[in-house]
Amino acid sequence: MSMLLFSGFKPEKKRDNPFFTEFKTPFQVPPFDKIDTTDYMPAFMEGIKQQNAEIEAIVNNSATPDFTNTILAFDKSGKLLTRVSKVFYNLNEAETNKQLQLIARQLSPVVSKHNDDIALNEKLFMRIKAVYDRRKVMNMDDQQLRVVEKYFRDFERQGANLSPEKKDQLRKLNEELSMLALTFGENLLAETNENFKLVISDKNNLDGLPQGVVDGAAETAKEKGMAGKWVFTLSKPSMIPFLQYAKNRDLREQIYRGYFMRGNNGNKNDNKETVAKIVKLRLEKARLLGFESYAAYVVDDNMAKTPAKVNDFLAKLWTAALPVAEKELAEMQKIIDREGGKFKLQSWDWWYYSEIIHKEKYSLDESELKPYFSLSNVREGMFLVANRLYGITFTKRTDLPVFQKDVETFEVKEANGSHLGILYLDYYPRDGKRGGAWCTDFQAAGWENGKKVYPVMSVTCNATKPTADTPSLLSWDETTTLFHEFGHALHGLFTEGKYTRTAGNVPQDYVEMPSQFNENWAGEPEVLKAYAKNYKTGEPIPDKLIGKIQNSALFNQGFETVEYLAASILDMDYHGLTTPADVDVLKFENDAMNKIGLIPEILPRYRTTYFAHIFGGGYAAGYYVYIWAAVLDADAFNAFKSTGDIFNKELAAKFRKYCLAESGDDEGMVQYRKFRGQDPSVDPLLKRRGLK
């Protein structure tokens, strides 16, 4: 173990480390202003030490194993480790730097070993198994039974039944995989935020771009020490408007090529070899645990249960979506031909010509919408929806420490005024933040020593930044993204349950349902009139524009569904491999896409070398879950629509209870049926996307 690992770790300074005591802040939010980089490693090491002692106390307990002395004791172990982990890993995603990245690399093998020490602890497993074997005669309630069964299954899936030799093999695999995922993410961050920028010096090359986009590029240039020029980056709020509006086709190709070649440039940040190793080692791990593929291992724990069911589901949607995308392509090619273009449409042309169709067919220009979607108005809109559905309120706080100056905090209260939780909102791109949008927590809802622990949720986005003259104006995609991530936050805020293992803990293919469900309200006329107001005049969005939004709901759905499904199928193909081999990732990707007939004008939403969801995050063999959950969310929203009241209080109360608060109380489909009274239908989703 590297000595650097312990740099700055002086036991006598423990009292100064904010992690070693309860946070002395309002609502016990993390004291970001008091946390120093040197605090993390000592806190991790002490947290591991404390949890090891707690595990030892469980396994050395001479009393007969029961729910309290074994299952509950394990469920509540590792409090300090959880506290520091939630802060460190969240900041390493949202506000990283070279120091945090170094610590993450040092921590990776240590944390991997600690997790394996617990998962492969034979004495601990035997005590859990003893409770599991006698669970039917131990007078436990339904939730206690569920916790016991979940932990027993967890240990089995983590290798508790393996021989000592195979346990050692699994440890090595887990350690190597954790390091590879870290490498993948660091490479991608460098490729996205450091290694590419489109610098424009000639104003003529800005032709076609709305003024707000030009102003944003000028601000970015100023930030990067290039005042007087215009800089576009690979963050989507910068890149997508350029692809939509820039008339200079060569520059459109340049920025899009910069995007889709990330991790595939033969430099020190190349991810091809990293991916090949991850795929090979994941298969080894799955086979070691008794599964024929990594996909089989993952999906076995999901609602879908088998890769075959997932693949069949994706294939049916693919068959419906590809012809729609091909029609969209033909429409755009007609425009190129009509204008005298002597070229076939390429992938970097799609946004530009689809935007022309958007204007021609639906008379809708994205730049026409933006003035009505200032970030503050969109935020108030999503708060309004939550208030009307669930009665909760949001009060801005200025007395809570934040981890970055632009982050805002809100106290969330129930209708009766009682405290429900805290919400952090982190809006804008920056060099230390990874791309995309996500929701996480700094503290999960739960119970500690008979007292309720209130959640501290955090939503992170990469939305269009404000300029000197204009507030942050969101695209329609950014608007629905904010509603989406807020849906995750509501799930966390409403979560109830006594036990860490089950409170809010749902299958991976259920996770996206609450977030996608919440998106539905963003475009409803009744809601739009309440929050979409012109940032200059305060006038609500006119009916004419609302009509255009409604009419264009099916716009580009072939493209959006196909690029998503292509990435989902690529994910399942990588993790469906059953024979260990050194994969040539470019050939593999090409073969996989040719097999399904993906048209060359559309790339998978994520190509292999920047597919962070599956190689740097937790969605391996699970990227399909967004569209699986979309079936549930469309069906659930259809229940509201069919009553004629999208704010139906009775339905909202049932959805909150069964699908959010008690979501971990039973299997995902069981909880959904409690809300809906029937199985979900795929028809609302197909109709919503114009695929039926």
Image (cartoon, helix red, strand yellow):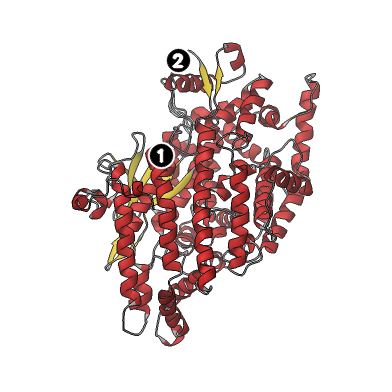
User: Of the residues under marks 1 and 2, which one precedes in the sequence?
Assistant: 1
- Separation of disc 1 and disc 2 at Cα? 26 Å
Q: What amino acid is labelled 2 in the image?
A: Ala
Disc marking residue 37: none
Residue 679 seen anywhere in this rendered image of the structure: no
Q: Give the side of residue 596 with respect to residue 492, left or right.
A: right
The correct choice, above or below, for 103 with respect to 349 in the image is below
Q: What amino acid is labelled 1 in the image?
A: Thr
x%, y% of residue 477? 56, 37
**How many marks overall?**
2
Residue 329 seen anywhere in this rendered image of the structure: yes
> Element at badge 1?
loop
x%, y% of residue 154? 49, 69
The foreground one among 311 and 408 is: 311
Q: Give the side of residue 28 with respect to residue 86, left or right.
A: left
The foreground one among 595 and 395 is: 595
> Element at badge 2?
loop
Provide the residue designation for mark 1.
96
Q: For mark 2, does the 10 Å Cα neighbourhood hold few (<14), some (14 to 19), or many (20 or more) residues?
A: few
x%, y% of residue 406? 36, 34
Q: Quadrant of residue 134?
A: bottom left
x%, y% of residue 469? 42, 20
What residue occupies the far bottom of the structure in this picture? 137
Residue at x 74% of width, y 35% of height: 601
The correct choice, above or below, for 46 with respect to 366 in the image is below
Q: For mark 1, does the 10 Å Cα neighbourhood hold few (<14), some (14 to 19), or many (20 or more) residues?
A: some
The foreground one among 348 and 126 is: 126
Disc marking residue 227: 2
The correct choice, above or below, for 669 with respect to 237 in the image is below
Of marks 1 and 2, the one in the foreground = 1
